Amino acid sequence: MNINLTLIGQSITFLVFVAFCWKYVWPALLGVMQDREKRIADGLEAADRADKDLELAQKKATEQLREAKEQAAQIIDQANKRASQIVEEAKEQAKAEGDRIKAAAQAEVDREISQAREELRGQVATLALVGAEKVLGASVDAKAHAEMLDKLAAEL
């Protein structure tokens, strides 16, 4: 065995192996590595987008929460104003009802006073006639009696 021939054969075999790897194995490895690199880059980009979307969603949620609080405050203010209006309306209605009841009571009192006066006039007239009969000692006839009552009622 010749060492030079062995070295040359091994060198040729190595070069054939390198050429084979260069032509068939290396492009497949590069494709897999580029695919993996692309997937990693896409994953990082998606993560960045997700972070931005999360930040945007948090801002939106904060803004909506702020708007909801403002609306709630407005609704509460409106409810308080409406409650005050209702209380004022109830006070006015109660006052009007009280005034109406007071006026009705006053009218009833006035009517009763008037009725009592008429009764008193009638009684006073009757007493006056009875007193006059006793003073005169005789009875006055019915016609004269009615005329005297009317005259006394008019004077009273």
Image (spheres, rainbow, N blue to C red):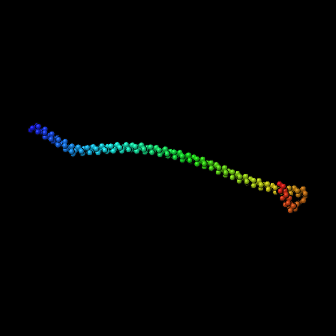
Which residue is rendered at x = 21% and y = 43% of the image? 22
Number of numbered labels in the structure image: 0
Percent of width and height locating residue 89: 62, 50
Which residue is rendered at x = 83% and y = 54% of the image? 156
Query: From this viewpoint, which residue is outermost toward the left?
Result: 1
User: Is 83 in front, or is 21?
Assistant: 21
Q: Quadrant of residue 153?
A: bottom right
Relative placement, left or right, of 46 versus 69 is: left
Q: Is residue 20 visible?
A: yes
Query: From this viewpoint, which residue is outermost toward the top?
Result: 3
Name above or below for residue 84 compared with residue 142: above
Q: Quadrant of the N terminus?
A: top left
Relative placement, left or right, of 130 versus 37 is: right
Percent of width and height locating residue 71: 52, 46
Which residue is rendered at x = 38% and y = 44% of the image? 49
Name above or below for residue 115 compared with residue 14: below
Percent of width and height locating residue 142: 86, 62
